[in-house]
Image: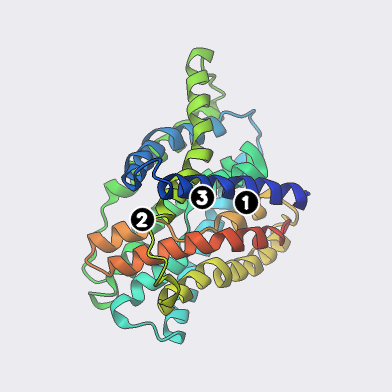
């Protein structure tokens, strides 16, 4: 797989300019900051599932099943490895015990949906997006199981007493769209044009709207004290630099072992795992009575810094 780095940079610049649009709309008083909530729900419940589903309406390739297995395996390896690295870094950076679990969670998990899908779509097209969708399956399983235990370690001995809400893990619109899309893909079913047209229009909204929502959320931050929070800075750097560097080494080894060097699989997985901390960190911190304020600050800071780190990471492609 060959990437035109100039074109990659232009694609990323276009996406980040959309973030600036969202930020500017709030700062100029065009829209209220409160609009991010309804927009986010519209993305998660409607446009993002449409994007996932339509990305899987592709010509059938017998080799795609092998790609699915490889991507799922990589996800089940890389997320736990990132978690281990994050725990070690939390001790190395002397993160206080009262939010060490949240710190490690924020350094481990990435924003696969709002940031990962649009950027992968811009860089690799619908084929790359379909791979990112598969990787998102492992994210959904691990973020609400392993991730919940990490956050609960702040209040209960290393995650004891955590009750995993499996209905939250399994029964989501994103998972439904993924399963339905895979069924249509492997059974060669077709969609009537009258149905496919609105689905396509809705899916086309996802990329610009997700970037604009990111900009709206960035406008909510307390910029005066943002860079004075050492733990938020170190967690963001671990998420955006240290863990991606470790992932790069592992993916290089996997590429050699599985004869995948130069494959889009490795590049897509690498790019998705270089995304900032997901907003679900704040939700889980609130649900499990952890440090919600620290989680929100890290989500904000990592989303801001990724404007610099993601272009740098793409320069390492192809793997």
Which quadrant holds residue 129?
top right
Q: In front here: 157 or 109?
A: 109
Q: CA distance from mark 2 to mark 3?
A: 13 Å
Residue 139: image location, x then y, percent? 45, 54
| Image: 284 above or below 95 | above
Query: Marks 1 and 2: in contact by CB < 8 Å?
Result: no
Q: Is residue 132 visible?
A: yes
Q: Position of residue 74 (x, y in %)?
A: 56, 58
**Please, what secondary structure does the residue beneath circle 2 have?**
helix
Q: Earlier in the sequence, mark 2 or mark 3?
A: 3
Residue count near mark 2 (Cα–Cα under 10 Å), binned few <14, some 14–19, many ≥20? some
Report helix, strand or loop for mark 3: helix
- Residues packed near mark 3 inside 10 Å, few (<14), some (14 to 19) or many (20 plus): many
Q: CA distance from mark 2 to mark 1?
A: 22 Å
Q: Which residue is mark 1?
A: 268
Residue 277 in percent (x, y) is at 45, 61
Q: CA distance from mark 3 to mark 1?
A: 13 Å
Q: Which mark is residue 115?
A: 3
- The residue pinned by badge 2 equals 280
Q: Is residue 48 left or right of residue 119?
A: left
Rendered image: mark on residue 105: none
Look at 37% across and 43% down and name the residue there: 40
Which callout, 2 or 1, points at the residue further toward the start of the chain? Answer: 1
The answer to whether residue 1 is visible is no
Q: Is residue 193 above or below residue 32?
A: above
What residue is at 53 percent from the left and 21 percent from the top?
189
Which residue: 34% across, 44% down? Answer: 32
Assess whether mark 1 and mark 3 are in contact (beta carbons under 8 angstroms).
Answer: no
Front residue of this view, candidates 4 and 186 = 4
Image coords of residue 92 (percent x, y): 46, 86
- Against 114, residue 231 (above or below) is below
Dot in front, 2 or 1: 2
């Amino acid at each position: 797989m060959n990437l035109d780095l100039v074109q990659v940079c232009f694609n990323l610049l276009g996406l980040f300019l959309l973030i600036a649009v969202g930020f500017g709309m709030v700062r100029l008083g065009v829209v209220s900051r409160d609009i991010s909530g309804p927009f986010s729900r519209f993305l998660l419940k409607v446009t993002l599932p449409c994007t996932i589903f339509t990305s899987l309406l592709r010509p059938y390739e017998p080799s795609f099943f092998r790609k699915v297995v490889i991507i799922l395996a990589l996800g089940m390896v890389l997320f736990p490895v990132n978690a281990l690295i994050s725990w070690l870094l939390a001790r190395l950076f002397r993160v206080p015990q009262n939010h060490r679990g949240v710190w490690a969670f924020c350094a481990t998990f990435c924003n696969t949906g709002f940031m990962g899908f649009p950027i992968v779509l811009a860089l690799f097209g619908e084929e790359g997006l379909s791979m990112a969708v598969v990787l998102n399956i492992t994210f959904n399983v691990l973020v609400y199981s392993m991730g919940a235990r990490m956050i609960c370690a702040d209040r209960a001995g290393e995650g004891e007493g955590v009750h995993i809400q499996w209905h939250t893990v399994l029964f989501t619109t994103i998972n439904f769209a993924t399963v339905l899309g895979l069924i249509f893909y492997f059974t060669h079913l077709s969609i009537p044009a009258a149905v496919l047209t609105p689905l396509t229009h809705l899916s086309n909204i996802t990329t610009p709207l997700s970037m604009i929502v990111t900009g709206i959320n960035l406008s909510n931050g307390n910029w005066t004290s943002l860079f004075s929070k050492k733990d938020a800075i170190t967690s963001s750097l671990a998420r955006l630099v240290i863990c991606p560097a470790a992932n790069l080494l592992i993916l290089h080894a996997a590429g050699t072992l599985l004869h995948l060097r130069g494959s889009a699989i490795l590049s897509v997985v690498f790019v998705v795992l270089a995304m900032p901390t997901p907003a679900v960190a704040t939700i889980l911190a609130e649900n499990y009575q952890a440090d919600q304020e620290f989680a929100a600050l890290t989500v904000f800071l990592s989303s801001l810094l990724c404007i610099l780190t993601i272009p740098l990471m793409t320069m390492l492609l192809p793997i």
